[in-house]
Image (cartoon, grey):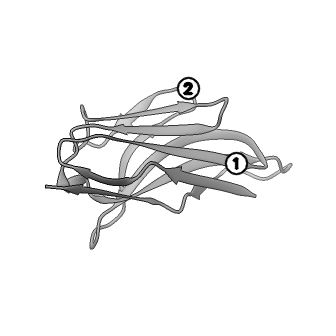
Amino acid sequence: QVQLVESGGGLVQAGGSLRLSCAASGLISRVNDMAWYRQAPGKQRELVASITSGGSTNYADSVKGRFTISRDNAKRMMYLQMNSLTPEDTAVYYCNANIKLLVIGQSPRDYWGQGTQVTVSS
C-alpha cells in the first residue's frame, strides 16, 4: 500500500558530497514526520535527521553543520544533502516516514525504505 524508495547513494571520497532522495508513493492520505536513519556494519541503526510536515528539523550531533534535510510535501519527497563526508558516515541510509493511509479508521504508522548504501573512502 505504501512504498518508500531511496536513491542517491554511492561511493564518494572523503570531503565529498552526496544527495539522497526518498520518494513516498501509494494510497497515502497524509505524510507526517519524515526522517533519515543510518546503520553502519556492526552498529545499531541511528537517527541522522528528521523533519516535520511543517519543516522543523532535528539533526544528530555528528552531522550538524554538514547535512541538510528537506522535503517537498507536494511531491511527497524527502532529501538529505550530505557535505564534507567522512569515512565515519559510511552506512546504509534508510528513509522513514509516518504515514496516514487512505483507509477510514486506520491510524498513521511508520514505514521504512529498503535503504541505500553510502560509502566514503579515505
**Residue 96 as seen in the image, left or right of residue 90:** right
Which element type, helix, strand or loop, lies under badge 1? strand
Residue located 28% across and 70% down the image? 41
- Which comes before the other along the chain, label 1 or label 2? 1
The residue positioned farthest toward the left in the image shown: 122
Q: Quadrant of the C terminus?
A: bottom left
Which mark is nearer the camera, 1 or 2?
1
> Few, some or many C-alpha atoms within 10 Å of disc 2 (few <14, some 14-19, many ≥20)?
few
**Residue 85 as seen in the image, left or right of residue 82:** left
Mark 1 touches mark 2? (CB < 8 Å):
no
**In the image, is residue 121 above or below residue 42?**
above
Residue located 36% across and 55% down the image? 10
**In the image, is residue 48 above or below residue 39?**
above
Residue 102, image x and y in percent?
A: 82, 47
The residue positioned farthest toward the right in the image shown: 104
Q: Which mark is residue 25?
A: 1
Residue at image mark 2:
54
**Residue 27 as seen in the image, left or right of residue 19:** right
